[in-house]
Image: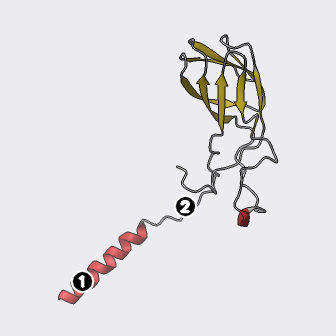
Amino acid sequence: MRGTLLCTTAVLAAAIALSACGSETRPNVPRPPVPPSLSVSVSNDTIEVSPRALAVPGRRPVNISQNDDSPQNQANQKAPAVVSVTISNLTSRKTKLILEGPVDQAVPITASGPGSFQKAMPTGIYRLSSPASSGTARFVVGPSRVSASSDLLTP
């Protein structure tokens, strides 16, 4: 009797486990790209931006040598690139950073302090200016959207 009960329990457990396995399939969709970072410093005379080109074809992130020739997965190239912008205000006055291009935005920054924002930026040329600085800076966002599917330790 005990052997029959044990066998019946094992068969029921296997049937329940197999019933949870579905035959549904779905295509793999590449993960969205990791947002590129842009650093901006605002001083009285100049506005510095680094790098000056984001998501430009041919300018790939550095790969380790064993993966140097492997192709990179591309995400949707028509989607705007979400860019993480970090700002350093080197002036002693409260001001704002003005972004002009395919999309516009004004971001307030504290005196002698940092600021940051994320913005979805379509492909194009952008200009940065500030009332606290006599300089301007330009940078370009290209159409290349490298998927994060092959990146380790990304959410």
Quadrant including the N terminus = bottom left
Q: Secondary structure at mark 2?
A: loop
Find the distance from the CA under tag 2 to the CA under tag 1.
32 Å
Residue 123 position by quadrant: top right
Where in the figure is residue 111, as x and y percent of width and height? 54, 16
Q: Is residue 52 above or below residue 29?
A: above
Residue in the image at 76% along x and 62% along y: 70
Where in the figure is residue 115, as x and y percent of width and height? 55, 25
Amino acid tagged 2: Glu
Which mark is on residue 6?
Answer: 1
Residue 122 position by quadrant: top right
Residue in the image at 57% along x and 11% along y: 93
Where in the figure is residue 99, as x and y percent of width and height? 69, 20
Residue in the image at 62% along x and 49% along y: 31
Residue in the image at 24% along x and 83% along y: 6
Residue 23 or residue 146, whichever sits in front: 146
Where in the figure is residue 155, as x and y percent of width and height? 52, 49
Residue 29 or residue 150, whichever sits in front: 150
Q: Is residue 18 above or below residue 71?
A: below
Amino acid tagged 1: Leu
- The residue beneath circle 2 is 24
**Given the current orientation, which residue lies at the most extreme left position?**
1
Q: Do the residues under discs 2 and 1 have CB atoms within 8 angstroms? A: no
